[in-house]
Image (cartoon, coloured by chain):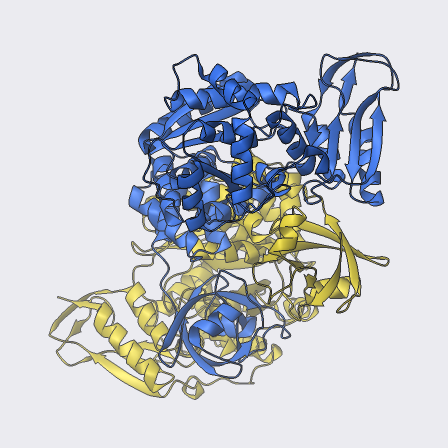
Chain colours: A yellow, B blue
């Protein structure tokens, strides 16, 4: 088949797309999502077919080419291209097998991951894979294969040093910003901890968002390796270095259906640890009956799954199951959380005790795992490093090396200017602070995209309050956002008093 | 959120799409496939978000709007639009339930079908539904709901006449063009048979393709109802009248994975029968060990499923299980099959006996089902109507009313000019004609898009041949296609001689 080109003047940035009018497609017996093999002169390309119903998009007698296809064929408007139906990638047969409930081999899974990374699969094909994994579940062997394939399909650090420590929390607890405290303590103790973090996905702040208030979190691979050798660690946004590129595409498909298939979740987390070369991982699993992990049974199940998977990958996984029912620290939102972190690191009396406590427990555990101290002495060792100012010095070293200032002052962290204080409606004791409600209010105020927005908690669970006393202060980026946040606060009633 | 518009100058013809640059999307915490609620002045619209990685598609600080969205908002380039994340349609919760293995209620299925018809679901969501149906299967109650929802979501004929006959063959047998013979016989007997047919999907010709050689197969609903009343029937392309619009979209998702989930297949066929108001359906299930239905066990299973479903829909289904292992008639390809049909209708000695025989069996069964004759007398009655010329007269009446000529001559049907005769390589008896191979050769020659292309069979199974005797003639639309077809004929060896 031969048709003159219409330059669509669109780029997808990934998948190669061509468009035919539906009349031509019907006549040529071609369907949306078919793969076409295109040729112009000596140039060749494979692209996914989209079918346009309107003549405005592509009229009959023309083939519309997106930017990536024009480039690959070195073609321009009105050039003639040849095309035929192309063979489907083998990974589609593997997806079909998974749909039929068969266990996939490592090489089948590797083929699928490669095709995901190279944008060779359409949304329909990828969705079927993800849906089949969700429905049938994945065996541990499949999860191991998926993890390895994902880890080695992207960038990976090759640090010639052992051990390499890593830490991860299965998110969802507002204000739980332990990483910027744990990493400096562990690095100051002489261990290597190359830490990549995520941005907020559904929460008001991720670790990367909070760190971005203080320094640059997007660095190239070579720089990261240098920092790991020179300083023992770094704290960056994992999304910027393509650590497990297949993962993002899988998550993009899970997102609209709000599914989080266990096998894929395990692989997603562990692939990123494998790609920085971690030998030891401390994993926090917070239990919250409204959160991701709802009870102890589920936490123990996940603990076993992570340990088994770690074992197969050569990563020593230690799991801390924690109470995730209440926010940690006082700030919820990037800048407010960054301020808490600095206060804890500088031993300021405004530093939230619960954040300090939790950070010391985690850092202590990592010190023990890394053989920096005897078992049972981790907490005390971590506390000494924090209180001596070594952790803060290491923190400043890392922040500065990544492009931040030479000192950071909590009081200099800019917060959003529109504020409103939510006060106790009556006397009593706080019986609960609702994670989800507080997160929603902080998001309504503008977090995480407005770094300075969010919530500052004046009170915590079990504290007594008197009518009219401040419960929390909303910081919003604009008058509109303040209005959204205050009406969210009225609607959700984030604080229970009895 | 507010951004100035970039007019993308693209129309999808269905789904409303807007595009943000990935930088903006990340900042706003929005993801591909999210639904956005857009507003400009008093105008509102809901659209699906696509995220562009390249600045060329949509630069940061702009929102790209497709044609359908521009129209809905009455917006143009550089206008400012407001947008927020919209609530997801309820049908997504239903899809999630199906993924979790739950049986869906009629109203849940109806909600999904409505959202499919109105393009409210993304490819990801629709694919998850189709994949979940494939993996979990559908209960008979679900199939009934799906059939009813699909039938009533599109156009349906309301003929005030009973009975209304229909006939369907679960395709795949080359040359099996009984419909244009059966419909005139049944209509000539005084019954009503409003027949919609499909075009070729993967075969060298569908009934609609063959009829298109002789007349117009695209007619508006009002005209169809008039023809049904005045002539007792019509023969048109079902795709032109939106009979079960959800079905096409489901098939578009099944196609790339080459799946054909039973529940969806049952619903797809029966919805179209329900939407023309059929009270009686004769269903042919041809068995071919390389085809859609591979053995008698499968045929009986399908027979039961169709009868049960028909029962719940108030359609009296009668099933004929036939031998589908060999081509029917001599022609394979739209014009070649149309010629066979005319020869049979005009009692020409060149009319293939097997096509005549099968058409009489089917027409006879329909006459019995419609109480036009006693049980056991259907075949003889049909034969009398055919041989008396009444069927041909009715055929001409219908063809003419649809826009065709007053007489049709088999010899006037134009065939493609590039021909090649495939000859027997040795003496012997033909033990098999391979349906799939012959279909591939006919398609390589240009069928169905070149109506005149295909294959004319000189011989059939069980016949003796001498070396050098013609087996079949290839008719191709161009020299290239003739070359493709002859090399396909060499590769596939469509005729076995022993």
Image quarter where the N terminus of chain B lies is bottom left
Q: Determine which quarter of the picture holds residue A157.
A: bottom right
Quick one: A212 or B395, which is closer to the camera? B395
Above or below, A277 against A474 in this view is: above
Quick one: B304 or B161, which is closer to the camera? B161
Q: Position of residue B447 (x, y in %)?
A: 70, 40
Q: Is residue A64 left or right of residue A493?
A: right
Above or below, B456 against A367 in this view is: above
Above or below, B402 against A52 in this view is: above
Q: Is residue B476 left or right of residue A289?
A: right
Q: Position of residue B388 (x, y in %)?
A: 54, 22
Q: Determine which quarter of the picture holds residue A258.
A: bottom left
Quick one: A296 or B149, which is closer to the camera? B149
Q: Is residue A138 left or right of residue A440?
A: right
Image quarter where the C terminus of chain B lies is top right
Q: Residue at x 20, y 70 (%)?
A: A463
Q: Determine which quarter of the picture holds residue B156.
A: top left
Please indicate, yes or no, whether residue A226 appears anywhere in the rendered image.
yes
Quick one: A177 or A28, which is closer to the camera? A28
Above or below, A408 against B276 in this view is: below
Q: Position of residue B91 (x, y in %)?
A: 36, 52
Numbered label tally = 0
Q: Residue at x 64, y 74 (%)?
A: B56
């Amino acid at each position: 088949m031969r048709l003159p080109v219409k330059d669509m003047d669109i780029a997808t940035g990934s998948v190669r797309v061509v468009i035919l009018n539906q009349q031509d497609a019907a006549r040529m017996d071609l369907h949306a999502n078919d793969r076409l093999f295109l040729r112009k002169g000596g140039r060749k390309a494979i692209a996914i077919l989209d079918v346009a119903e309107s003549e405005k998009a592509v009229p009959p007698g023309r083939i519309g080419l997106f930017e990536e296809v024009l480039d690959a064929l070195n073609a321009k408007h009105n050039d003639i291209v040849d095309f035929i139906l192309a063979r489907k990638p083998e990974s589609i047969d593997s997806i079909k097998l998974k749909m039929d409930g068969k266990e996939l081999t490592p090489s089948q899974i590797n083929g699928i991951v490669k095709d995901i990374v190279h944008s060779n699969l359409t949304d329909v094909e990828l969705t079927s894979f993800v849906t089949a994994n969700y429905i049938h579940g994945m065996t541990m062997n499949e999860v191991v294969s998926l993890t390895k394939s994902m880890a080695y399909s992207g960038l990976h650090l090759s640090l010639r040093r052992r051990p390499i420590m890593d830490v991860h929390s299965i998110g969802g607890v507002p204000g739980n910003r332990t990483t910027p405290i744990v990493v400096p303590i562990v690095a100051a103790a002489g261990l290597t901890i190359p830490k990549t973090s995520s941005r907020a996905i559904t929460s008001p702040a991720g670790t990367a968002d909070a760190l971005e208030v203080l320094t640059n979190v997007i660095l190239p691979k070579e720089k990261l390796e240098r920092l790991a050798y020179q300083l023992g660690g770094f704290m960056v946004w994992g999304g910027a270095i393509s650590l497990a590129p297949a993962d993002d595409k899988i998550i993009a498909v899970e997102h609209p259906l709000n599914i989080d298939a266990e096998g894929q979740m395990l692989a997603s987390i562990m692939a990123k640890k494998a790609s920085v070369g971690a030998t030891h991982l401390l994993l926090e699993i917070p239990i919250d009956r409204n959160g991701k992990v709802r009870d102890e049974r589920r936490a123990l199940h996940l603990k076993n799954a992570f340990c088994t998977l770690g074992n197969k990958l050569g990563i020593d996984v230690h799991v801390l199951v924690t109470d995730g029912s209440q926010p940690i620290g006082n700030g919820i939102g990037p800048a407010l959380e960054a301020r808490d972190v600095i206060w804890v690191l500088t031993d300021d009396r405004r530093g939230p005790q619960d954040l300090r406590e939790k950070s010391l427990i985690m850092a202590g555990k990592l010190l023990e795992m890394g053989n920096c101290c005897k078992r049972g002495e981790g907490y005390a060792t971590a506390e000494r490093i924090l209180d001596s100012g070594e952790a803060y010095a290491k923190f400043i070293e890392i922040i500065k090396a990544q492009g931040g200032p030479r000192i950071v002052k909590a009081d200099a962290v800019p917060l959003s200017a529109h504020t409103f204080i939510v006060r106790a409606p009556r006397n009593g004791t706080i019986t609960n602070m609702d994670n989800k409600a507080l997160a929603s209010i902080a998001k309504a105020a503008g977090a995480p995209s407005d770094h300075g927005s969010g919530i500052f908690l004046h009170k915590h669970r079990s504290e007594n309050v008197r009518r009219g006393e401040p419960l929390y202060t909303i910081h919003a980026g604009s008058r509109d956002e303040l209005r959204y946040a205050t009406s969210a606060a009225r609607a959700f009633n984030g604080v229970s008093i009895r």
